[in-house]
Image (cartoon, rainbow, N blue to C red):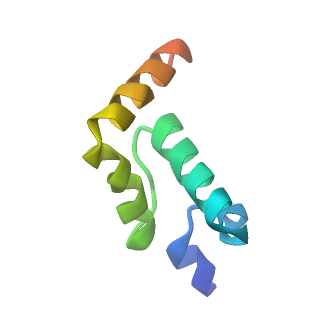
Amino acid sequence: MYEDEKRFIFFEAAKGPGEDISESWANFVLKDKTNGRGIVMDKWRFFFDYPEFVKMRSFIRKRLDLQ
């Protein structure tokens, strides 16, 4: 395992902060549960600390028929 695998959900996320947040957000919205650990899991759980993010996630998942 290379170092970035411990900090990022996907390799693309290692390109910069914008990619990191967008990959983390996409993972949060589209996955029922992340398979990440450590920092990756912390990033995923971060979104659950904000009710408005959870509400947006629910709205998007419902529109995509993922619920």
Instruction: Report whether 28 appears left or right of 45.
Output: right
Total marks drawn?
Answer: 0
Q: Residue placed at 26% from the left, 48% from the top? A: 49
Instruction: Report whether 65 appears left or right of 43.
Output: right
> Which quadrant holds residue 10?
bottom right
Q: Residue placed at 45% from the left, 62% from the top? A: 36
> In which quadrant of the rendered image does the C terminus lie?
top left
Is 67 located above or below residue 22 in the figure? Answer: above
Is 50 located above or below residue 57 in the figure? Answer: below
**How far across and how far down the image is residue 65, in percent?**
51, 15
> In which quadrant of the rendered image does the N terminus lie?
bottom right
**How far across and how far down the image is residue 12, in percent?**
72, 62
Whether residue 47 is visible here, answered yes or no, is yes
Instruction: Report whether 38 appears left or right of 15.
Output: left
Q: Residue placed at 56% from the left, 62% from the top? A: 9
Is 19 located above or below residue 61 in the figure? Answer: below
